[in-house]
Amino acid sequence: MPPAPTKTKAQKAAAAASSGKGKKKKWSKGKVKDKAQNAVSINQEVYDKIFKEVPTYKLVSVSVLIDRMKINGSIARKAIRTLEKEGLIKPVVHSRSQIIYTRTTTAE
């Protein structure tokens, strides 16, 4: 039996470099959501918009007002309390963490 051919150092290095284990997996950074720039105080224009549009929403909650009106959470809670006192919206579900309102229909 003839002796097995031996590989040179260059051949061994080339074989190691061509194997699939060469590079490490790069992890993606993930998606980063931009920080919302919601208004901390409201002007007359936003105040009028709240009283005109919000009573027409089928679902009214703090998070809905924050998304649609671009206002702060404390302002949204105050606006909802004011709208409820004036009878423009009525509560549907009252849980510990969130209160959900709906528009007041004219039949009532």
Image (tube, rainbow, N blue to C red):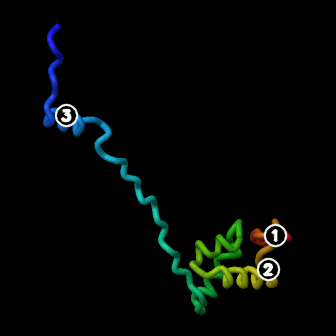
Looking at the rendered image, the disc whose residue lies closer to the viewer, 3 or 2, is 3
Give the numbered dot on residue 96: 1
- Residue at 55% x, 81% y is 38
In this rendering, would 15 be left or right of 105? left
Structural distance between the alpha carbons of marks 3 and 2: 79 Å
Q: Quadrant of the C terminus?
A: bottom right
Q: Amino acid at mark 3?
A: Lys
Give the numbered dot on residue 12: 3
Looking at the rendered image, the disc whose residue lies closer to the viewer, 2 or 1, is 1
Say which residue label 2 marks: 84
The answer to whether residue 14 is above or below residue 91 is above
Q: Are marks 3 and 2 in contact (CB under 8 Å)?
A: no
Pinpoint residue 103: horizontal percent, then vertical percent.
Answer: 75, 71
Give the numbered dot on residue 66: none
Q: Residues within 10 Å of mark 1 (few under 14, many from 20)?
A: few
- Residue at 60% x, 92% y is 44
